[in-house]
């Protein structure tokens, strides 16, 4: 574990919060108490607290980083120990086997539930503020307060293959997590209040995943799925001047059209068509904002045969015409 000039790098064996405390302390120092680590100065400042209730440990963290932070979580290879990660605020990039997947929690939230049988690398950009709530679930130690929840989780993670679920954070859970950080400022009674909110968030999310799976609206993704979907995403981004169909993509990447559409939306929170149009118009905006290209040049370069169609799509996605880009601050 070391700090480099470009990025601050931390490697943590996936597991309980003590692993994270050790990893962070080796890099940042800080003040450690029985259930808290505080770093008040340096390139990264944060306060991390953690508590355990009958086999379920929950951690909440408020972090500010002035330099890029790269956190590598190595597999624990224990299928009976699950990890539920919730990023309420902030942006980061998550990497699976050299493929990047960017998540902006301001737009789509981020709930990530996985069995830590594959490595995960999170990169947080410089000048970022991250608000996080996490749960470590030991299925063999879950107590009676979680009656029935262990069985639900086991139904989601059948077998010993690397598997993960992703979902958006509901408004109700956003409110509950906000309460947790507000209660943290109390001088008395904060632990039971925080614990009550954390248990409610935990239960809400586990039941949400189970309900979505039962309705066939959600499926767990294996590491191979993440790798393939990120290759599809990168193919789209590198081919913004071309058009293609779902059938063509599915044939190229060896997956059925139905699975491709469903899994892509599951991972990225949007359809392939919407992602393609958004990426296309983001690139158009970038070029137009540079002042080096005309509207016609950008439209034709991005594969449009009609500038009126390009302008129409640009306004639909961005909310204003491409000719008005220079007026946008």
Image (cartoon, helix red, strand yellow):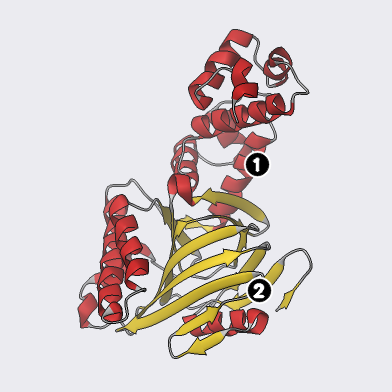
Up-down relation of residue 155 to residue 2 (above or below): above
The residue under the point 54% across, 76% down is 14
Up-down relation of residue 248 to residue 144 (above or below): above
Indicate which label's residue lies in the foreground, 2 or 1.
2
Query: Would you name the residue on which mark 1 appears?
Result: 234
User: 164 left or right of 69?
Assistant: left
Q: Of the residues under marks 2 and 1, which one precedes in the sequence? A: 2
As drawn, the label of residue 305 is none
Query: Would you name the residue on which mark 2 appears?
Result: 42
Whole-percent x, y for residue 227 in the image: 60, 52
Whole-percent x, y for residue 104 in the image: 52, 49
The residue under the point 25% across, 83% down is 143
Visible residue check, residue 114: yes
Whole-percent x, y for residue 93 in the image: 60, 55
Whole-percent x, y for residue 268 in the image: 50, 45
Depth order, front residue of 298/165: 298
The residue under the point 64% across, 57% down is 125
* Number of other residues with Cα within 10 Å of mark 1, as a class: few under 14, some 14 to 19, many 20 or more: some
The residue under the point 64% across, 79% down is 28
């Amino acid at each position: 574990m070391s700090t480099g000039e470009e990025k601050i790098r931390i490697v943590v064996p996936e597991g309980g919060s003590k692993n994270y405390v050790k990893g962070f302390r080796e890099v940042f120092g800080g003040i450690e108490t029985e259930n808290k680590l505080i770093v008040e100065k340096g390139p990264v400042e944060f306060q991390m607290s953690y508590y355990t209730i009958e086999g379920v440990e929950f951690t909440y963290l408020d972090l500010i980083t002035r330099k890029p932070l790269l956190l590598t979580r190595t597999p624990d290879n224990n299928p009976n120990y699950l990890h539920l990660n919730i990023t309420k605020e902030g942006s980061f990039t998550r990497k699976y086997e050299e493929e990047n997947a960017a998540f902006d929690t301001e737009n789509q939230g981020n709930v990530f539930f996985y069995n830590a049988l594959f490595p995960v690398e999170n990169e947080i950009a410089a000048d970022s503020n991250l608000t996080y709530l996490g749960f470590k679930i030991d299925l063999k130690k879950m107590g009676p307060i979680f009656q029935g929840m262990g069985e639900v989780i086991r139904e989601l993670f059948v077998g010993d293959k690397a598997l993960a679920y992703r979902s958006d954070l509901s408004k109700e859970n956003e409110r509950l997590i906000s309460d947790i950080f507000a209660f943290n400022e109390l001088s008395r009674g904060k632990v039971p209040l925080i614990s009550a909110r954390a248990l409610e968030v935990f239960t809400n999310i586990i039941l949400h995943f189970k309900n979505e799976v039962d309705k066939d609206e959600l499926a767990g993704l294996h590491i191979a799925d993440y790798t393939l979907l990120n290759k599809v995403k990168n193919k789209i981004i590198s081919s913004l001047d071309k058009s293609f169909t779902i059938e063509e993509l599915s044939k190229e990447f060896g997956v059925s059209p139905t699975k491709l559409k469903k899994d892509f939306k599951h991972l990225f929170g949007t359809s392939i068509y919407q992602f393609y149009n958004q990426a296309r118009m983001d690139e158009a905006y970038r070029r137009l904002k540079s002042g080096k290209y005309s509207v016609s040049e950008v439209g034709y370069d991005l594969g449009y045969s009609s500038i009126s169609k390009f302008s129409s799509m640009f306004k639909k996605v961005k909310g204003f015409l491409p000719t008005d880009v220079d007026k946008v601050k």
